[in-house]
Image (cartoon, coloured by chain):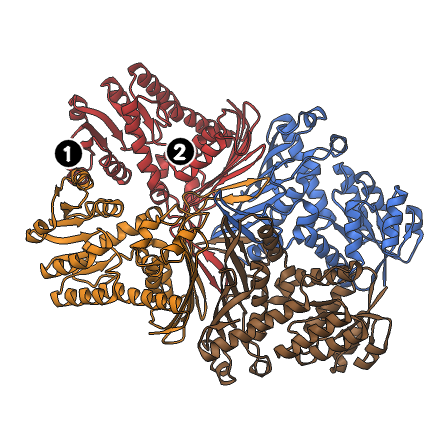
Chain colours: A red, B orange, C brown, D blue
Amino acid sequence: MIDVAIFGAGRIGKIHAGNLVRQSGVRLTHVVDPDAKAAAGLAEQHKARVSDTEAVFKDAAVRAVVIASSTDTHADLIERAAASGKAIFCEKPVDLALDRAKRCAEAVKRAGVTCLIGFQRRYDPTFAAAKQRLDAGEIGKPEMLIVTSRDPGAPPVEYLKRSGGIFKDMLIHDFDIFRWILGDEAKTVHATGSVLTDPKVGEVGDVDCTAVTIRTKSGRLAQINTTRRAAYGYDQRFEVLGSKGMLQAGNHKPTEVVAWTDASVSQDKPEYFFLERYRVAYALEMAHFFDVLATGATPRTSIDDGVKALELAEAATTSWREQRLVEL
Amino acid sequence: MIDVAIFGAGRIGKIHAGNLVRQSGVRLTHVVDPDAKAAAGLAEQHKARVSDTEAVFKDAAVRAVVIASSTDTHADLIERAAASGKAIFCEKPVDLALDRAKRCAEAVKRAGVTCLIGFQRRYDPTFAAAKQRLDAGEIGKPEMLIVTSRDPGAPPVEYLKRSGGIFKDMLIHDFDIFRWILGDEAKTVHATGSVLTDPKVGEVGDVDCTAVTIRTKSGRLAQINTTRRAAYGYDQRFEVLGSKGMLQAGNHKPTEVVAWTDASVSQDKPEYFFLERYRVAYALEMAHFFDVLATGATPRTSIDDGVKALELAEAATTSWREQRLVEL
Amino acid sequence: MIDVAIFGAGRIGKIHAGNLVRQSGVRLTHVVDPDAKAAAGLAEQHKARVSDTEAVFKDAAVRAVVIASSTDTHADLIERAAASGKAIFCEKPVDLALDRAKRCAEAVKRAGVTCLIGFQRRYDPTFAAAKQRLDAGEIGKPEMLIVTSRDPGAPPVEYLKRSGGIFKDMLIHDFDIFRWILGDEAKTVHATGSVLTDPKVGEVGDVDCTAVTIRTKSGRLAQINTTRRAAYGYDQRFEVLGSKGMLQAGNHKPTEVVAWTDASVSQDKPEYFFLERYRVAYALEMAHFFDVLATGATPRTSIDDGVKALELAEAATTSWREQRLVEL
Amino acid sequence: MIDVAIFGAGRIGKIHAGNLVRQSGVRLTHVVDPDAKAAAGLAEQHKARVSDTEAVFKDAAVRAVVIASSTDTHADLIERAAASGKAIFCEKPVDLALDRAKRCAEAVKRAGVTCLIGFQRRYDPTFAAAKQRLDAGEIGKPEMLIVTSRDPGAPPVEYLKRSGGIFKDMLIHDFDIFRWILGDEAKTVHATGSVLTDPKVGEVGDVDCTAVTIRTKSGRLAQINTTRRAAYGYDQRFEVLGSKGMLQAGNHKPTEVVAWTDASVSQDKPEYFFLERYRVAYALEMAHFFDVLATGATPRTSIDDGVKALELAEAATTSWREQRLVEL
């Protein structure tokens, strides 16, 4: 039986807790959250105990930690877990500061512990199938990638202030998709953005729509377009053009009903937001984490992936702010 | 805590067991199956005990039974459960003989126990959304229904011999869909069929492809087409035409990948078979059963629905055998 | 230069005239219509002369006639054209009476003239591609056919009175599709129908919705569903199931715009009605007629096809009226 | 009757000639092409005469010229036509040099003649419907535009040498789409490109894949991705995101057949290339030209549109060559 502690009993913490207790041979023993009520609720649901950071790291029986707490706690918890020899499942991002993230990666490597960063999109059945078929050569060599990544609505401005900006907060997933799908690293990054949905976003020094172009070391091209507000919902697609064809990874719909009326022929909008669209991905990601623990394999989304995506987010932020092409 | 006994530890029994233990306040206590190994396996997985029929009905703590055993045991178990005052979740069909099924329905009513028949398709998110939108008036009054119901491959001939024939074994679901969607009863039934996929089917007095037309009491029209073997997989669709439009309920796909190649633009085939397509439906159906127990509501799929669908299956069988229109 | 006379300067006559003058080496010389204004208009547009039946058949230069006049004139004109040795392009149906239609077919054969019946659907690019791929073996041997054939709105009741009833007037096209796609002849026909859209249809002894099932000599099954009023427009689809897969022939849309809004993801309704959907088919049909004249080939849609479709329409009418299965 | 002269009897010249002779009150009188055989063939087909440039401009009866000759002749012919007071229909681009194109625009304005530049995509039914619905406010204010523009195969290297480079030769259409759809002008342009399909393209100083980002004066964002070689054919799509939704303008398919097999569910590839996809657009564009002549309206695609698109192509070329953001 593997004992696991979770940091964070909020929305995403609950998802991860629910998924980890479904793994055979795994149980949740500690729940840590500054919000005592949230901690108690989650602990009770899974027959775990409310705990604190010190208790977790002192408890030798805890073999793995799930870090789903606020972003500013990630780096400390990663380093402590590494120092304690505990396996780590950490939500993105590693940290908002690239230097700090790199130090975390070093600490993880020194300690030799397993560390999986929660880029859950790589576990999405549609995205993973596209990647697998690409790797199997179905469309030849990849040449271009177009990523569309749009949220149904912007988070509160208070959140935006502490988010690190749209490139680190939102596009970090898209940068990871870029690296994963093209299997290549960026040579140059160009990013631009605008405030089109809500002037308050601009007041806190951020943008709500972005357009990014990446050219890779081997000359492949990627374009990413994002917005904080797509009126029709959560739009998560990419298409990869290869020398022999194209693979498109599309949105998921709640149902397969088609309505034919005097006005049009219509289908469902995409699933509402990330908790719906990536429900299966979150479950598969957690299963993968414990598979990795059992087999000693390398996680599909490592801490290095977390660092590299952050590197791209920094470059994009610079490109946008300074209105110039950034070379990596 | 509601104690539940399950009859049948085979493929569908495992599905139901897995779903019922996920209901809060519910536990599986008895597993009954003539196959001792299957019973032991399922019991162990859910910390229940291997049991037998007598023990189940003597155990006053058992408040509900799930009947997922072979068809010829359904009627006896329903009657015993009714006599013992236990709630009943029973796989379709109630029985292969209409008389016997009617007696079961009477027994259930006399006893006043809850009885849900496993027409799981009514719980499918796509089918249920279509029904809900129809009821909400989105396409006006329903006029015509086209049901396409095709299996990816025929069961073994040994199974077919004891199946009651394709109309009772396979189309019983489609007859239920017909009654549910049109909200009307059949006045006349015409059925025809052929042996087109495997001559052995004909040797046991059955057909493997059918075409059924039903005219309802209020003049609505329904057509059902089925085959035991669709090379592209499990095809489960219906479309209902109303005075103001049409609703189509389509297949579900494993992923939303689209491949564009020199040959074509292609998508996934439908999900493989009923366990995949109706995975969510089975879970929702079981949740509904325990909601009904908690609230005293009427099950969405009652034993009367089981009887009515069987009535249609008998009429269709007669129409096919005697090559004539059958009036109900 | 081939001189052609057209009978009928109405809606469909104009379409045929427009298509025939685009054939190289072909010119329209005579326009015959009891409506003098319509005749004059069409004649002027194509630099032909207003004429009458006698003049057409006396004019030895007229090598081909296009019969697009009212149904009750078809048989006479076919017989006169055959007697005069002129090639015949005739709109469906040959006649409303099966006997008369058969006599026409005999007259055509005796005279040895080319006669093409305007089952334009066989020339539709989508339908023709489906047929070609079926014949090429892409889905193995055909087993079942589902035809959906729905009009956007019923014609005036005055028209219905003289139409011969829905089976001869509307389903005659679908019976032709059935014979063409399955490449087989009917053994039994079952038809039913209802008045669901307008009670006036019933008052003239007709129905507005039908459901037909045909079993072929080799045991293949076909179902046809039709309505005079689909609120979403002209719905023209079929799907053929074969031993190795299925081919669906779908509707055509005016544009490929997809709108994603807060309400749904929607596309265009089908093209409005037969003049829009079969615009290309009408052009290809006329081109085929003159190809046949040039090469002496057999028309893709012969007068025998017209007779056979009528035979099915009569059987269906009987089945519906007498509420019984009809054997052919 | 309007007499028209055409310059260029090649592939696109034939298309335009075929469309112009279908306009009522219009006839083709002069065909000019250095390839005598091509000129003779086209002239004969439409009962025009083979002619030369001098004869065209001396013939006062010629009211309009269609310029479909090689790019290096456009500017001269525009200026001569303007000087002669003849209406002008000219294929894109006006000229490869921006200065020269601007001088043409001035000449046209001074002369007050009608001049339509052949950006045929604006006349495509799908693209035009998207634009119309956008203008009607269906998705609120436009915010982002994604243009996908991919050819099925690269032209010969000899062609590329004289083409002005991919931005002027191929993306000029996409720059026009950008201006038309967003109804806004570029403030900054970033372009990058690669040679991924054929090294010979690089040897003549060009690229075969590009990724362009434009930020407009009002902060809207546009991304364009192009390749000379999409293995699955001619891919012509755009999607425009607005404050209330998204409109996608998709590819056209030859037929609406869907094939369901053991391997996948597949549809047709897009129509082969621009002559197929834009067949209707070319016809509507020519009809529009003569409507403009009749009514004195402003052409939907004016010479100023030609100049502005060229300006963007120059900026993109600079951005790509100098690897920097270009401000307009």
- What amino acid is labelled 1 in the image? Val
- Provide residue C131's location: percent of width, then percent of height: 60, 55
- Report the residue that reaches farthest toward the bottom: C203
Q: Is residue B115 visible?
A: yes
- What amino acid is labelled 2 in the image? Arg
- Using the rendered view, name the quadrant where residue A85 is placed: top left
Location of mark 1 (residue): A50
Identify the image quadrant of the N terminus of chain C: bottom right
Direction from residue C109 to residue C173 in the image, left or right: left
The mark found on residue A25 in the picture is none
Q: Which residue corresponds to the image point at 67% horizontal and 32% vertical from the top-left? A: D317
The mark found on residue A122 in the picture is 2
Mark 1 or 2: the one toward you: 2
- Using the rendered view, name the quadrant where residue B71 is placed: bottom left
- Provide residue A277's location: percent of width, then percent of height: 37, 43
Chain of the residue under label 1 = A
How many residues crowd mark 1 within 10 Å: few (<14), some (14–19), many (20+)?
many
Q: Are marks 1 and 2 on the same chain?
A: yes
Label 1, label 2: how many angstroms apart (C-alpha)? 32 Å
